[in-house]
Amino acid sequence: MFLFYQHHFNMNKAADFERQGKDGAGFRSILKKQAALSDHEASILDQVTADCERAIADQDAKAQAVITAFRMRYPVGDLQPGVTLPPPPPELATMQKERNAIILRARDRLHAAFGEQEFRRFDTFVQARTQGSISSRTTSPRAATALAMRTLDLRNPFSRLRTESQFTGGGR
């Protein structure tokens, strides 16, 4: 869910400002103000976001290890003429499903904590906010895994494995 990534980014930006002796409250309260969340709801969102991003980082590290091992077996530019690169390791597809499940569990935690009516209102806000900023496209699972292998670089915080729904048109 793009929401958790963006909110985590804002919380980190606030922490960076505060480490420099600056006021980070503006970054911390962006989503709270925009979504009209109560202090309690904002606190829940902060905790669920931190837990989700921590679990995602752990999952991405596991996937990066598999990708690195695969790349070591088949270094870029070292493939012999006539040799076809094998498909990505099958465990990446499983890891991607596990990653998706982490995000869905975080969403479900918010739903349970907010209650049906407030979650519906919040979800409508999130959908409206992200509608124009996420493009849709349909990609096969194999192509999605291959794309993830090409694009994931854990040294770059903006390089992320995508959720299955992004590859099928639903966004993060």
Image (cartoon, rainbow, N blue to C red):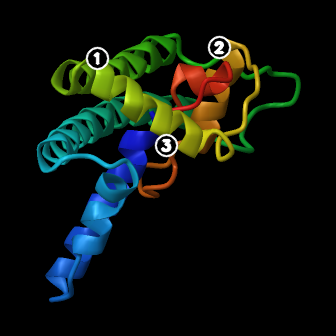
Q: CA distance from mark 1 to mark 3?
A: 30 Å
Label 2, label 3: how many angstroms apart (C-alpha)? 16 Å
Picture quadrant where residue 10 is located: bottom left
Q: Residue at x 32, y 49 (%)?
A: 36
Is residue 74 left or right of 111 when viewed as pictured?
A: right
Circle on res. 160: 3
Q: Residues within 10 Å of mark 2 (few under 14, many from 20)?
A: some
Query: In the image, residue 56 lies at what x, y percent?
Result: 32, 34
Question: Residue 90: image x %, image y %?
Answer: 52, 10
Which disc number belongs to residue 116?
A: 1
Of marks 1 and 3, which one's residue comes earlier in the chain? 1
Observer-nearest of 43 and 87: 43
Tag 2: amino acid: Pro
Q: Earlier in the sequence, mark 1 or mark 2?
A: 1
Mark 2: secondary structure: helix
| Figure check: 148 above or below 140 | below
The answer to which of 157 and 76 lies nearer the viewer is 157
Residue at (74% x, 44% y) in the render: 77
Tell me, yes or no, if residue 65 can be seen here: no
Asked if marks 2 and 3 touch (Cβ < 8 Å), the reply is: no
The vertical placement of 52 against 129, above or below, is above
Q: Position of residue 72 (x, y in %)?
A: 52, 36
Task: Give whichever of discs 2 and 3 has the lower sequence position.
Answer: 2
> Dot 3: what SS?
loop
Q: Secondary structure at mark 1?
A: helix
Please give the name of the residue rendered at 87% of the width and 30% of the height, measured from the top-left corner: 81
Q: The residue under label 3 is which amino acid type?
A: Arg
**Residue tagged 2:** 141
**CA separation in Å, label 1 and label 2:** 32 Å
Residue at 26 percent of width and 46 percent of height: 37
